[in-house]
Amino acid sequence: MSAHAPKPFHARRLDAARFALEAGTLEGTVPLPDFPRLAQEAAAQAITADAPVVIGWQAQGEQRRDAGLDDGIARAALHLCAQARLPLVCQRCLQPVWTAIAVDRHFLFAPDEAQAMQLDEHAEDDVLAVAGDFDLLDLIEDELLLALPLAPRHDRCPQSAPQSARNAGFDAGVLDKPHPFAALAALKGRQRGSNDL
């Protein structure tokens, strides 16, 4: 009688407790458009069909003792790594700046929010409340968003940043338009002249 093959794990519907208990492993690549919140942070003009941006990731289930918890209990946990090279918008020249983003995190699993909050007060690792299946790819996107630099910049910008937002046509229109107080000044001048008579 043959043994049943183990049930495969799915990143979008991960049984976290079983994944940790069986020391499961998952890995893959995800095209940037599949992470819409992360894609909003990218400089769209730098992404082409010939050079798509992909995110690589690896997840390992484990039983882990957290150094911040002194009870010595090994809990269901996850070791998550993700990496990508993203075209972000340089805050100096507003052109794409290719930036390496990496995540290497450990998470503990708790069966509900109350236990997660209790453990999170002392645990060194983040604690996730996972009662059933959860979406591992959502977690990966969250962690990559948190890892983005606040103000991405080139070390040396490929072109100088615009120094002003002046536009010749706009400036000409402003010069042609009468100043709002010009009529008032003319009126005051006329009143002063009539008073002198």
Image (cartoon, helix red, strand yellow):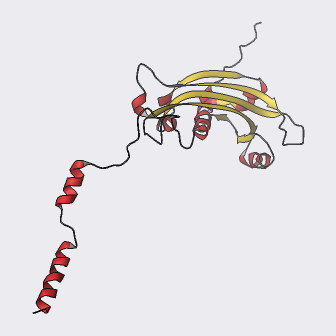
Q: Residue at x 75, y 7 (%)?
A: 2
81 or 114, which lies in front?
81
User: Which quadrant does the C terminus fall into?
Assistant: bottom left
Q: Residue at x 46, y 23 (%)?
A: 52
Compared across the picture, whether 181 is left or right of 30 comes to left
Q: Residue at x 18, y 66 (%)?
A: 178
Relative to 1, say whether 175 is above or below.
Answer: below
Q: Position of residue 108 (x, y in %)?
A: 76, 37
Q: Position of residue 47 (x, y in %)?
A: 43, 27
Q: Residue furthest front?
A: 196
136 or 52, which lies in front?
52
Task: Choose top left, top right, bottom left or bottom right for residue 1.
Answer: top right
Total count of labels:
0
Compared across the picture, whether 101 is left or right of 159 comes to right
Q: Residue furthest right?
A: 71
Q: Position of residue 92 (x, y in %)?
A: 46, 42
Relative to 54, say whether 165 is above or below.
Answer: below
Q: Residue furthest top?
A: 1
186 or 117, which lies in front?
186
Compared across the picture, whether 196 is left or right of 37 comes to left
Q: Position of residue 152 (x, y in %)?
A: 53, 39
Q: Residue at x 51, y 33 (%)?
A: 35
